[in-house]
Amino acid sequence: MSKLVGCIEAGGTKFICAIGTGADDIRAEVRFPTTTPEETLGQAVAFFKEQQAELGPVAAIGIASFGPVDLNPDSPTYGYITTTPKPGWAHTDVVGAIKAELDVPVAFDTDVNGAAFGEYKWGAGQGLNTFVYFTIGTGIGGGGMVGGQLMHGLLHPEMGHMMVPHDLTEDPYPGHCPFHKDCLEGLACGPAIEERWQTDAANLPEDHKAWDLQAKYLGYLCVNTTLMLSPQRIILGGGVMAQPHLFAKIRSKTQELLNGYVQTPELQDNIDNYIVSPGLGDKAGRLGAIALAQALI
Amino acid sequence: MSKLVGCIEAGGTKFICAIGTGADDIRAEVRFPTTTPEETLGQAVAFFKEQQAELGPVAAIGIASFGPVDLNPDSPTYGYITTTPKPGWAHTDVVGAIKAELDVPVAFDTDVNGAAFGEYKWGAGQGLNTFVYFTIGTGIGGGGMVGGQLMHGLLHPEMGHMMVPHDLTEDPYPGHCPFHKDCLEGLACGPAIEERWQTDAANLPEDHKAWDLQAKYLGYLCVNTTLMLSPQRIILGGGVMAQPHLFAKIRSKTQELLNGYVQTPELQDNIDNYIVSPGLGDKAGRLGAIALAQALI
């Protein structure tokens, strides 16, 4: 039987902490807004202390965090959130804060790598060794596995900021990204949709041209991901993807843009199984952090 | 001492075959034009048979091939060049043709993964676990390693065809790619430069605006690669990169486009060491195929 572990899904807006042994066995869970590091990490520590008194000790804690983060175990700032623009959070020692109060091994990765790992264990990434998980929401982020390992590298990928074609005649919206204006995130994140169309995305009907444009940008995302990484599957999660009609449009746009260049059944007849929604829904992040903790013990 | 192995750098224009033990010990080498599969693979077999009679048996042969290729060992067409538009070469069983005549283990990968592996063993990829090798020439191709393994996935990456911004006001050239017109290869491969400026690239002086435009497109390549893969280094080889003045322009454009988004010394003060030329020059492919063969034994 799997051991009891803890997890923290550390988001820029809210934290979710949980204790359990796997996707089907979460024994306690709490969520609270992300305020200052002291208060927020303090609340996480308090949750684990209280719950351990009741449920017994956790063998490890996994953290899937907003970033950028330092994932290099040899770095003096390993386990930190580094240069985030989020007020108060730049250069925060997340792993250190948890380890100082709770004497357990701590696994640490990006929020999107965490979600990818959750999908690998219990969701749409099962049995795959190379796949990508994207979240399309307030921002756009991507993580994944290549050759059976979570993607790290120099720092960690920041896939959402890739630069893609932007036809200003069709879409004069200048873009929402404070760094790059019209990178993919700048064109296709939730706030960009709302700013471009001057309404909440939920108010846009399915036949609104907003969704064709959105599918085009997310088609570029899927095309460039296919060409750069040759994944076995692309998982699209996050608030914007809560519009299920978007999937068919994105799949069709991806095929149109690739124009038959990559010849494989997965991209032709079977594309419904290539660009998919998360098997774990919006729980991928915290369940992934559970899986990260279990991988440590 | 390393064992004697053979290699084939199988290009769409020419084949290079060699026998040796490593980068500093190539004992025989031959090159011949790529004609029909029968003739060309026959010449490769004849070279190894003749040379083995003189130099002794090779323990394995590595092949770094133009593609697309089938790299899945479980596939019935493993070792084939698959859907290439090159006349006569579609669905050619390259590994089978070599194994049928030469009774040795055969390693098989893409030309760019081969070059990346050569750079990993003896060139600019030494000591790294995540890096990318691009060739910018008649076409644009990319391969590399992630987490210490060569990139494969569903098929293999086709990085050169990524889609990037194309400002038609600045550059009305429609693009050279038969599949995507103005994908990166369509805008920045050697034939695109020549068609756009109506002259051989070698005739364009260093201060010609052609090179600023070229650096912009290759800047997009480096930016998107940085964001997708977070490599520790990007190696740019191929005929177009024989213009050494291009490197400074590409590095500067990459920094300008990233606009400080990825905060790391490698991308700020030390970018000369991040975007580099191949340590093995134009020998990366065949030496990589030697390394692939050695990894098999």
Image (cartoon, coloured by chain):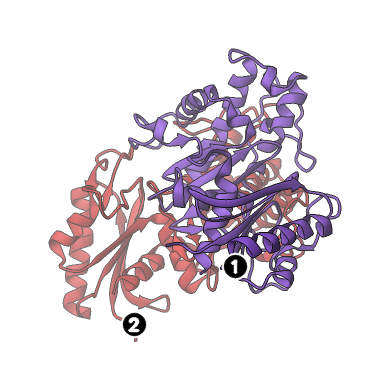
Chain colours: A red, B purple
**Residue B89 appears at what percent x and percent y?**
81, 55
Quadrant where the N terminus of chain B sits is bottom left
Residue corresponding to mark 2: A2
Secondary structure type for disc 1 = loop
Which residue sits at x=73%, y=48%?
A258
Q: Is residue A2 left or right of residue A143?
A: left
Q: Is residue B183 visible?
A: no
Where is B15 relative to B236, above or below? Answer: below
Q: Quadrant of residue B62?
A: bottom right
On the image, the x and y values in percent for residue B74 come to: 65, 74
B276 sits to left or right of B171: left
Residue underneath mark 1:
B57
In whole angstroms, how far apart are the C-alphas of marks 2 and 1?
52 Å
Please rate how many residues cluster around mark 1, counting C-alpha atoms within 10 Å: few if below 14, some from 14 to 19, many from 20: some
- Up the image or down, B182 lies above or below A147; here it is above
- Residue at 47% of width from left, 44% of height from top? A139
Residue at image coords 41%, 30%: B272
Q: Position of residue A141 (x, y in %)?
A: 47, 49
Task: Chain letter for mark 2, please.
Answer: A
Label 2 environment density (alpha carbons within 10 Å; few <14, some 14–19, many ≥20): few
Query: Between A161 and B140, which is closer to the camera in this rendering?
Result: B140
Residue A88 vs residue B290: left or right? left
Q: Which residue is outermost to the bottom?
A: A1
B51 and A55: which one is in front? Answer: B51
- Disc 1 marks which amino acid? Pro
Kindly indicate whether the residue at mark 1 contacts the one at mark 2 (C-beta within 8 angstroms): no
Residue type, mark 2 in image:
Ser
